[in-house]
Image: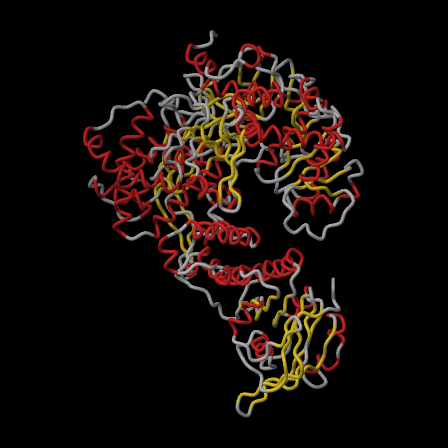
Amino acid sequence: MAISEEVKKNWSNIPDVLTQGVQTLPQLLLYQADRYGDRVLHRKKDFGIWQCFTWNAVVEEVKTFAMGLASLGVKRGQTVGMIGENEPELFWSQYGILALGAKGTAMYPDLTAEQMEYMLVHSESVMVVCEDQEQVDKVLEVEEKLPKIEKIIYWDDKGMWKYNHPKLLTFNQVQDMGREYLKAHPNLFEEEVAAGQGDDIAVLSYTSGTTGLPKGCIMTHHGIYDSVLRIIGATDMKPFTQYLSYISPAWATEQMFGITMGLLLPLVVNFPEEPSTVTENIREIGTEALVLTPRQWESLASLVESKMMDAGPIRRGLFKWGMAVGEKVNLALLEGRSIPFLARCLYPLADKAVLHPLRDNLGLQDAYYAVSGGAGMAPDVFRFFHIMGVKLRNVFGTTEMGLFTLHQGDTYDLETVGKWMTVHPHLGPELEFKVSEKGELLIKGGNGFAGYFKNEEATQEVYRDGWYYTGDAVNITDKNEIVYLDRVKDMRELSTGHRFPPQFIETRLRFSPFIKDAMTLGDKDKPFVAAFINIDIGTLGPWAEQRKIGYTTFTDLSQNRKVREEIVKEIVKVNYFLPEGSRVKRFINLPKELDPDEDELTRSRKLRRGYLEEKYSDFVSSIYSGKTDFNAEVPVKYQDGRTGTLNAVVYINDLVEGGGQDQ
Amino acid sequence: MKKNSQIMRTEGISLRFGGVLALSDVSVNVGQSEILAIIGPNGAGKSCLLNCMNAFYHPQKGQIYFEDTEITGLRPHRIAGLGVSRTFQGIQLFPGLSVIENLLTGRHVYMKTNPITDFLYRPWTHRQEMRERRRVEEIIDFLEIKDIRHQIVGSLSYGLRKRIDLGRALAMDPKMLLMDEPLAGMNLEEKEDIARFVIDIREAMDIPIVIVEHDMQVVMDIADRIYVLNWGNIIAEGTPDDIKQNREVIQAYLGEEG
């Protein structure tokens, strides 16, 4: 595929460093520092004031730290661990380590001492750079098992006043040693930086590994460049964008954004004062670009929701109205529909009264590039921010192969993880992908996967003939975009050999205002997917009244023909994102509500699957025996503890063959 | 640790409220950089002793010396000016002001300008404001309250308000810190926080801390030395280990043959 003009244009905004011999991150740092010198690269709030570090200042910090490490004996090819919250020193440490040709082990600050021990031993780290007492304590706790660690360096000395351990050094002490060392070796830093190669290992990023031990994923300089250029090609980010660095560099995404794009685009990288002050800081710096995890976006959204719950009725009403107008306008823009005339007229007012203050309070007023990294965030959360006027995008990738897809442009499909990005021709062939029989996504191209550190076996397992096995179960839409379903290991298999993602289906169904709970049926004894639906009488009741549909009880409403048709529509929407054979074919609206008091749900409203399949066994058998209705008897427990039986005719509903992609 | 030299001592002080003898002939000394705890059952006179130390109460008998100067009978603000700072059992903050403003009140002793010059906002007022704010920010950093620096104190939880109270005391850059029941009414986590700050204050600022407290567990963990008061008398003095073994102390707390 030819590279589009737009991608070329976006690439032309940045210097073509690859043709100028710039291969590693430290080389890039020096190259860009020559151009930008006194402009600001890093900002950090300290003692209540934003402190700025210019390019020259950062180079000086990195240089002295790197030379300090050199004087302590760190050599090309060795490893140095890094652990702490995002602060300038963490970034400088990494640049300094890489400048010597050593590699860094990026570790999450919330690791336990044991996890840290595993990574430091496995990566053969000779030193570790820690933020503060908390991290130093963890290292000291397992210090006996870390014979290779020669020095423990820390930059925040709070609480460290009485520590007296022979291996401890402060960041500043190392820098002082570096200054001394520079007097004897004035050109060493530049020489070491120049000796770096693009396929040197930059960082080991340990995957969390839900099964077995974590694997140290190798990220080379070129591998990181590759992803960053893919991103830059896919967006029109402006140089000196105010970026908030919040996600940990232990996560590959921040290696690409804060650490590398920060140098390449460049960004002004802002560090929050503390994790707890981040919402305040986002606002102070007028953040223009930020990447958060799905979890963090969700918590921002629920923060707004819960604050609005506390607000008085007038404010709540105003909020609802503003969001309704925002929905009509901003979602139409997103989906490429035309905007209703009335909403268009009301929008300026809604924006002024509700949406603008909302964005402003969250600090997202200037955020033109807001990203959620990873997969699987509910489209509703994306919609929430879009309604507010924040164009939240998803970026999807793996630590091993870099970032693949991004929501690009102004209109995109929130159900998918975005459009494929373009690989820079200097860094490898175009990305290719295919879906295996199991439904697993396979990726090929770009700079490729450099392997797991000291683990050839695991590398072989996921990387064969240039194809990387992501372990993600996906479906491809007709526009060639990916819908993320689940991890392959969480998929369930039917007797036909088809696999389906129970979580995906159930969570999407629960998004429907008419569905309170849903449970999918299907295993190796069953030929197709079926579902139990617990309708939401809170929304369907008024819905029925508005349409003059009479009903008496929950049971009656659930089996109403019109209601069942409505649920069919909801299931069709979900089926659209599933491959043929994994779609829901039949469903039953349960004649009573699922109730934790009857052990059907846990107290946190999780389904008790085994119990439900047993209790509703005649429902299950009716579905798979092809009946269209049957007389159900369901034991019920009343609130006073008496038990009884609910008798009702229950209908089994079929979805149109083919799942209704055309509907 | 310079344990021998004393920063404060009381010599045979007695305090009487009408017929009640709250303190009788109490002599204590506070070392240069120690965490000294005063414990005792309810009504033993612990707070009275603390209140004598910073001159809220004036003992009828005996003398108090601070850095070898007699301070018996001085007014409380003079004592504060000498460098004795304290936190209170009930919180004494301005609930309507922000955290920063409350901490700035602790800097008041160091401010040289008057309302008129402040109103005109001359350069020296500006410089003073920068200087004092900087010190306050250092304390905010030290006490890890960055996320609430702009919040109104009245809206904060009890545990946090206690921490602000401590911050205000520290903002005075004291030579000695008195803490009256800093852990009362706190949950376990808040207690652990404060206990850690007490240790940090000693380590980072090297100032002696006198602490009146009921929570034996914490006191035994953090104190270097303990005085035990009962009915206005010192009944024991020593390291936490000594006190744990002391028969008289056990009796005072648990009763005869306890």
Q: Quadrant of the C terminus of chain A?
A: top left
Residue A103 visible in the displayed image? yes
Rendered residue at 67%/21% (across/down): A190
Rendered residue at 74%/46% (across/down): A140
Q: Nearer the viewer, residue B162 or A558?
A: B162
Residue A525 visible in the displayed image? no
Horizontal and vertical percent position of residue A276: 50, 46
Q: How is the image coloured?
A: secondary structure
Classify A384 as above or below B169. Answer: above
Number of marks present in the image shown: 0
Say which quarter of the image contains residue B82: bottom right
User: Looking at this rendering, what residue extends furthest in the top direction?
Assistant: A2
Rendered residue at 55%/82% (across/down): B58
Horizontal and vertical percent position of residue A118: 72, 37
Horizontal and vertical percent position of residue A566: 31, 34
Say which quarter of the image contains residue B155: bottom left
Q: Nearer the viewer, residue A334 or A583?
A: A334
Tell me if B206 is positioned left or right of A48 in this view: right
Horizontal and vertical percent position of residue A4: 43, 10
Tell me if A611 is positioned left or right of B44 in this view: left
Rendered residue at 42%/34% (across/down): A508
Classify A245 as above or below A99. Answer: below
